[in-house]
Amino acid sequence: MTTQQTESTEVAGGKVVLVTGASSGIGAALARRLVADGHRVVAGARRTNRLQALARSTAESAERSGGSLLPVRLDVTNRADVAGFLEAARDRHGRVDVLVSNAGVMPLSRLDSLLVDEWDRMIDVNVRGLLHGIAAALPVFTAQGSGHFVTVASTGAHEVVPTAAVYCGTKYAARAITEGLRQESAPFLRVTTVSPGVVTSELADTITDPGAAEAMRAYRAHAIGPDAIAGAVSYALAQPPDVDVNEIVVRPVQQR
């Protein structure tokens, strides 16, 4: 199949879009929006009960739009799991058009709290998880002659604040890796980084450090909903094949 034929098929039948971390927050909002847009979404996360509920909640929207949602258990820290996630999509739909690397964790703490296990978890999910996705999808996109990588980073990829040194470090890494991927990729590949600001989600629920948790409660006073981020990704995916939306920052008006 030629690149031109692939692009025509995508437009006619909606794209096959893989979303990691789809069980809640931005990932779930992304899945709902993309199904409503008529895409065939493969939603991955560890909490399969949440994914099943998401599939049920999008059934009516899928019937109207022609989209669909396939729930697949996924642990992005496991390289074989991520490869299997891609294979599940190809087995069902015959191709993969977009990989949205959204899975992330944010157990903030001061460095002198020495919560090393939590640092390791952030590195495993936020950085290694992204790399596992690239390793699995890049050969598929190259063979197809088309593909689109979308990384959900953070405004923490642009600034560092107290208690967020390790988290911001992982997001700086995610942004750098994604930009490097864009520069190295063949012309037929599109690469987008979306950096959300303060968004309503479960991310803050993983914070065990009392001081960081208290600071986050104040910081999240003016959060926006995850649908705003879903809209940004939807916009990037909807552009013509010769348009590459490289980077989008979406934050609350009151976040300075």
Image: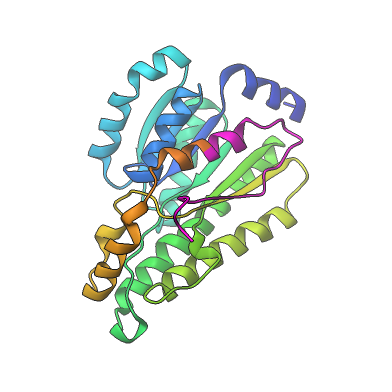
Q: Quadrant of the N terminus?
A: top right
The image quadrant that residue 48 belongs to is: top left
Q: Is 109 above or below relative to 83?
A: below
Give the image location of residue 122, x and y in percent: 39, 66
Q: Residue at x 48, y 50 (%)?
A: 253
Q: Is 20 above or below relative to 17?
A: below
Segment colored magenta = 232-256
Coloring scheme of the render? rainbow
Specify whether residue 147 is painted magenta. no
Q: Is 254 above or below relative to 94?
A: below
Q: Is 166 above or below relative to 174?
A: below
Query: Between 178 and 216, which is closer to the camera in this rendering?
Result: 216
The image quadrant that residue 3 belongs to is: top right
Residue 217 in the figure: left or right of residue 89: left
Residue 93, visible in the rendered structure: yes
Q: How many labels were placed on the picture?
A: 0
The image quadrant that residue 245 belongs to is: top right
Q: Residue furthest front?
A: 254
Q: Residue at x 53, y 64 (%)?
A: 157
Q: Residue furthest bottom?
A: 112
Query: Between 90 and 75, which is closer to the camera in this rendering?
Result: 75
Q: Residue at x 40, y 56 (%)?
A: 104
Query: Between 189 and 104, which is closer to the camera in this rendering?
Result: 104
Give the image location of residue 142, x and y in percent: 69, 43
Specify whether residue 239 is painted magenta. yes
Residue 97, visible in the rendered structure: no
Give the image location of residue 67, x and y in percent: 46, 21
